[in-house]
Image: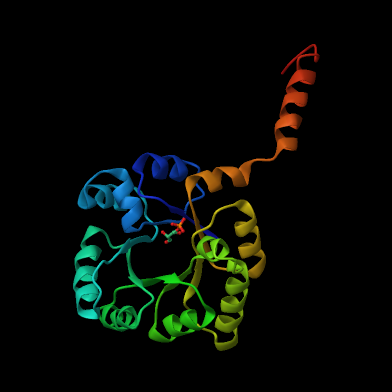
Amino acid sequence: MKFFIDSADIQEIREAHSLGLIDGVTTNPSLIAKTGRGFGEVVGEICSLVAGPVSLETVSRDAAGMAREGEGLVRYGKNVVVKVPMTTEGLKAVRLLGERGIKTNVTLCFSPVQALLAAKAGAAYISPFVGRLDDVSQSGMDVIGQIVKIYANYKFTTEVLVASIRNPIHVLTAALMGAHVATMPFAVIKQLAQHPLTDIGVERFLKDWEKVPNKF
Ligand code: E4P
């Protein structure tokens, strides 16, 4: 399973990257705005730091505009994946960009049939937002299970990129379901490594180690 960090904060991305566990990055306009920095400056730094796929989002509403923006975005690095929204115009943009050899990530997906359309259009990734579904009392992870099943039924090559992850249970369930990628905030990546029994165990071993007479 691949792990992406969902962030535009270069410090966070650098720290996560140093763990050696990060396969790529996803960003969105809200994450870029949160940095308070210019778009070009931020994404330039991200693309030079991370070798894996970096998703950068378009903001046009029409396919031609998205395709035009996408062609501009890939100039930031050969690892750039162009994010388009799960709209009919977004699906047209997936085709247009695909014809130009540009990979796409269809974002803001909230249903298995939307994911089916994105795969048929030829998207490299589909991003179903599990946390935002949970927020409206719909099970985000049920949607992931259905998408994974549909893609397997028809051998689609589009990768299921579980997005809007809020906690380690989302990651665990996504892994059990066989989703290809989980993109998550740095806080969740750190939570994955934590267990209170690990901390207690380390403390106990170090305390007992003090009692050992001839060390190393
Ligand atoms: C994914 O590509 C999105 O940037 C992200 O996961 C959205 O998450 P949120 O619902 O926490 O904003």
Q: The C terminus lies in which quarter of the figure?
A: top right
Residue 48 in the image: x percent, y percent?
Answer: 29, 50
| Quadrant in which residue 107 is drawn | bottom left
Residue 138 is situated, as x and y percent measured from the top left of the image, at: 59, 69
Q: Is residue 171 above or below residue 159?
A: above
Q: Is residue 159 left or right of residue 56?
A: right
Snapshot colouring: rainbow
Q: Position of residue 157 (x, y in %)?
A: 48, 79
Residue at the image position 29 percent from the left and 73 percent from the top: 102
Residue occupying image coordinates x 49% and y 73%: 110
Residue at 26%, 66% in the rendered image: 59
- Above/below status of 145 relative to 54: below
Q: Residue at x 80, y 11 (%)?
A: 213
Residue furthest to the front:
136
Image quadrant of ligand 1? bottom left
In the displayed structure image, the side of residue 104 where residue 152 appears, left or right: right
Horizontally, is 74 left or right of 214 in the view? left
Residue 199 lies, in percent from the top left, at: 70, 32
Q: Quadrant location of residue 137?
A: bottom right
Q: In which quadrant will I find the N terminus?
A: bottom right
The one nearer the camera, 142 or 214, is: 142
Along the horizontal axis of the image, is 46 left or right of 71? right
Numbered label tally: 0
Q: Is residue 163 above or below residue 15?
A: below
